[in-house]
Amino acid sequence: MKKQNKTWALLAPIVVLVLIGGVITAALALTNEATAPVIAEAQRKAAEKAMQTVLPQGADFALVESTEGLPEAVTEVQAAGNGAGYVITVSAKGYANMTVMVGVGSDGKVTGTQVLVQEETKGIGSKVVEDGSAFQQQLVGIDSVDGVEGIAGATMSSNGMKNAVQAALDAGTILSGGTVEAKVYEAPANLTDEVLAQYYPGASFTDVPGGKVSDAGTVVYAGEAGMTGPVPVAVLFGADGQILAVVADTSAETPEYGQPLGENGYTDAFAGVSGGGEVDGVSGVTITSDAIKGGVDYAIANLETVKGAG
């Protein structure tokens, strides 16, 4: 009996804890079941309010089921049932990641913008992303971000918003049955004949929009926003489509920080990869290294287009 009592004394706390855990789990499940519809309804109303803000003339919004064929940054499209236009949600990169909702009217012009998610620097990037900011006010009525002025000291945030709005405008054009010409990048200044000869000995290249083509391989140009502006990139592909090398012109980036990435062997890490994400960013110069990685991804996505132009 004493042995059984001793055993029970050891097991009792465990049994009690298990029972308490079961009760708490059940209570949480019931609470979640009860609150989930309330949360979903609140989110729906918030989304409707945001859509009405960026496309005031819109009504009877309906989700466009597929974003295939639209700019990659577009994550969701709501079409106004009354034909007023579209509400387009876009993911973009400012100083940090941001999610932007853009209204595009039936005339192809911006009717309003609202930043849904952002982590921009308070007092700097926030001047761009805050509701009703002077930067966002200048976006209403435009059909292109060409000529939109950024906020001094908040270049990254300004460029992120401009990229988001242009992606939404392009999506609106495509959704309305129009076409958008792919952006054509120029070669980085440090892509020399000597560099080409190193990777394509004896090859003769033909210049085409967005790159160069030859029997030995293809060079695709790209450009992503760095710390101080676009970072021109050239990705050198072999005849088999594998990356041989990456050339990045970082001369305009911050000296002693982003600038050396185009010179210190960092780009060597991209040889043979199938995506920019396979190469780690560089601590302290994340923005510049991310620009190079983004350029590599763009070049990979456009390889066949450039090859076909030859």
Image (spheres, rainbow, N blue to C red):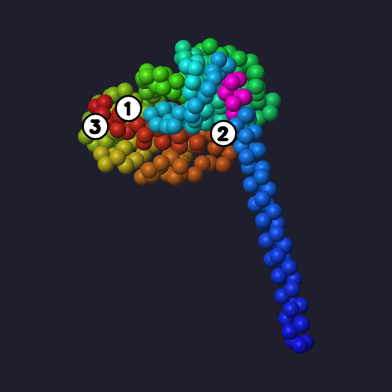
Disc 1 packing (10 Å; few <14; some 14–19; many ≥20) = many
Q: Which image quadrant: the C terminus?
A: top left
Q: Residue at x 62, y 22 (%)?
A: 128
Write down the residue under mark 2.
97
Q: Position of residue 122 (x, y in %)?
A: 68, 28
State if disc 2 and disc 1 touch (CB < 8 Å): no
Residue 187: x, y in percent? 37, 26
Residue at image point 62% right, 34% down:
41
Q: Position of residue 142 (x, y in %)?
A: 51, 13
Q: Secondary structure at mark 3?
A: strand
* Range of residues picked out in magenta: 47-54
Could you say whether the residue bearing mark 2 is in a helix, strand or loop? strand
Determine the residue positioned at 74% across, 78% down: 8
Against 14, residue 231 (above or below) is above
Q: Where does label 1 land, which residue?
A: 211
The alpha-carbon separation of the residues under discs 2 and 3 comes to 38 Å
Give me the residue at 66% from left, 45% from top.
Answer: 34
Question: Residue 287 versus residue 274: which sits nearer the camera?
Answer: 274
> Three-letter amino acid code at disc 3?
Ser
User: Would you say residue 189 sits in the magenta stretch?
Assistant: no
The kind of secondary structure the magenta stretch mainly shows is helix
Which one is closest to the eye, mark 2 or mark 3?
2
Q: Amino acid at mark 2?
A: Asn
**Res 250 seen here:** no
Disc 3 marks which residue?
Answer: 214
| Helix, strand or loop under label 1 | strand
Q: Nearer the viewer, residue 52 or 35?
A: 35
Label 1 to label 2: alpha-carbon separation: 29 Å
Q: Total label count?
A: 3
As drawn, 124 above or below 31: above
The Cα–Cα distance between marks 1 and 3, rounded to whole angstroms, is 10 Å
Looking at the rendering, in which quadrant would you find the N terminus? bottom right
